[in-house]
Image: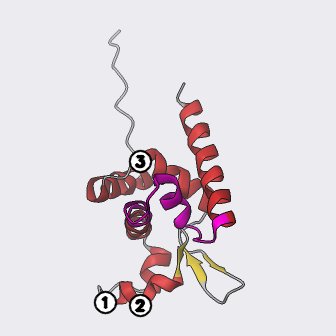
Amino acid sequence: MVWLTPPPETPSYTEVCIARAVQEYGTHPDLIRAVMAQEAGKVGQLRYNKDGSFDMGPMQINSVHLPELSRFGITKEMLVNNECLNIVIGTYYLQRGIMQSSSFWVGVGNYHSRTPDRNVGYQVKVWNHLQQLRGERQ
C-alpha cells in the first residue's frame, strides 16, 4: 500500500488577505486577527452608530474615512463587499493609529476611539483576543 502525505492546508481567503495586509504595512498578523475578532464584522455588513456614522465589513471601517478613501476611488460598496480590500484598508488605519501614537496600545485603541476610557476598554478586548489566539496554538 502506498501512503501519501496529505496536501498542505490551503490558507483561507481571509488569511491570504491578512498576509497581503502584513506585507503592505508590517502589522503582526495576530494583531489583525485580534482586531477582526473584536470588530466581529462580516462581508456585506453595515452597522449604524448612534452618532450617525456607520461601520463597514470585516474590520468595521468607520464611514468617517470615506472622504479620504474616495480620493483613491474606494467606495462604501467596495469596503462593505470586498473582504481583501476591507482588511488591507482596516490594517492601514490600525497601523497609522499605532505609528501616530506615543504608545503602541493607545494606537491600537485609537482604531476604535480616541476617547480615553473607550480606548482603554478596546485595548483590553484586543489583548484578550490576542491571548485567546495564542492559546489556541499551544
The residue closer to the viewer here, 2 or 46, is 46
Q: Report the Cα–Cα distance between label 3 and label 1.
A: 27 Å
Identity, as a three-letter code, of the amino acid under mark 2: Pro
Residue beneath disc 1: 71
Disc 2 element: helix
What separation in Å lies between label 2 and label 1 (alpha carbons)? Answer: 7 Å
Q: Are marks 3 and 2 in contact (CB under 8 Å)?
A: no
Q: Quadrant of the C terminus?
A: top right
Q: Residues within 10 Å of mark 1 (few under 14, many from 20)?
A: few
Q: Picture quarter containing residue 128?
A: top right
Return the disc, 3 or 1, that comes first in the chain's sequence: 3
Magenta segment includes 32: no
Magenta segment boundaries in residue numbering = 94-116
Label 3: state its secondary structure.
helix
Q: Residues within 10 Å of mark 2 (few under 14, many from 20)?
A: few
Give the residue at mark 3: 29
